[in-house]
Amino acid sequence: MNMAEQPVVCAAQVSPGVQSNNSGGGAAVPVLFCFSVFARPSSVPHGSGYEVLIQKFLGLYGDQIDMHRKFVVQLFAEEWGQYIDLPKGYVVSDRCKVRLVPLQIQLTTLGNLTPASTVFFCCDMQERFRPAIKYFGDIISVGQRLLQGARILGIPVIVTEQYPKGLGSTVQELDLTGVKLVLPKTKFSMVLPEVEAALAEIPGVRSVVLFGVETHVCVQQTALDLIGRGVEVHIVADASSSRSMMDRMFALERLARNGIIITTSEAVLLQLVADKDHPKFKEIQNLIKASAPESGLLSKV
C-alpha cells in the first residue's frame, strides 16, 4: 500500500493528545477510525504510532481500500475543530479520532514515451480470430511493424493468447522472436500475476503501448487494469480491432475519456526515437516509409 509519508507539523498545531516520542505500550486507548463515509470505533495500545494505525485501518477497511492509491492519515485536532495531517512521530496517548484520506491530486497525462520506460503489450492476435475481426489483415501488418520497432529499440514485449487450446496460437505473420513473455490466458485482461511479476522485473516502467483484439473486451480491460495500477496506457488504433466497429468505436471513446491515449503506430515509433540523430532512426524510418493501411478503421476511431 503506497501511503504518503507523514508530514511534519509544527508543535503549536498539535492537539493535546499528540506526543512526539515513541515511548509507551500498555493499556488500550479508544480510537475512532474513519474512512470514506464509515466510522468504526476500536482501540490500540497506549503509545501506538503510525504503523499500528495503518495496520488497524487495513484490518477494518482492507476490502474497501484501493491498494494502488496513495493515502494520508489525519488526526482530528480539537483546538482547530478540523483534521490535520498526522504529525511525524505521533503516538496515541489519549482517546482520539483519525481518518484515512485518499489523495485526489490529478496530474495531466502528457503521453511522453521513451524506450527505457516503455513496454509493448500484444493482445490475443490469434489465428481463430482471423475471419471474425474487422480489418484483421491490416492490424496484423501494423502489429508486425510495432514488433519490429520494439526489437530495434530494445523494448520488452509481452504477448498473450486467449484460450489457445480452442482459439489457436498467435498468427504466423507476427514474428515473436525475442519477446519477453508469451502467456495463455482465460481472463480477459492481460494483467495476469505473471505479467505483473514481469513488469516488476523491468526498472522504471511508466508506459504500456497496447494493441490487439478485441478492442472493447481484452484490450479495454487490460487498459483499465493498467491505469488502475498507475501505468500510462497508449492504445494503437491502427493495430486494434473488434468484430463490431460500433463496439470498437465506443470502447476507444470511453478509454480516451478515462485518460488513456489513443494513438497510431507511426506516432508511437517516431515518439520513441524522438530525434533524427537517434542511432536507430534510420531503421525506424524504413519501417514507416510505407504508411499504415488506411482501412475502414480510420472512420471508426
Image (cartoon, rainbow, N blue to C red):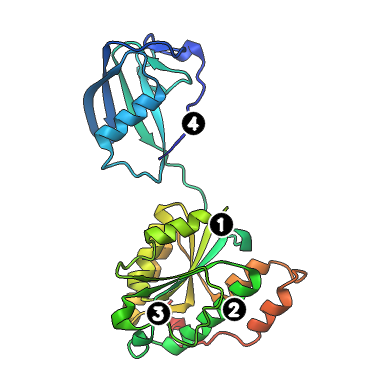
Q: Which residue is mark 2?
A: 148
Q: Which residue is pictured at 60% across the width and 85% down the height?
A: 291
Disc 3 versus disc 2: distance between alpha carbons?
A: 20 Å
In the displayed structure, does residue 120 sit left or right of residue 56?
right
Tag 1: Cα neighbours inside 10 Å, few (<14), some, or many (≥20)? few
Which residue is disc 3 drawn over? 241
Give me the C-alpha separation between circle 2 and circle 4: 42 Å
For the N terminus, the quadrant is top left
Whole-Å distance between the Cαs marked 2 and 1? 25 Å
> Which tag, 2 or 4, sits closer to the chain's start?
4
Q: Residue drawn 38% across and 64% down?
A: 222
Mark 2: which secondary structure? Answer: helix
Eyeballing the image, is 229 above or below 153?
A: above
Amino acid of disc 2: Gln
- Tag 4 residue: 5
SS class, disc 1? loop
Q: CA distance from mark 3 to mark 1?
A: 25 Å
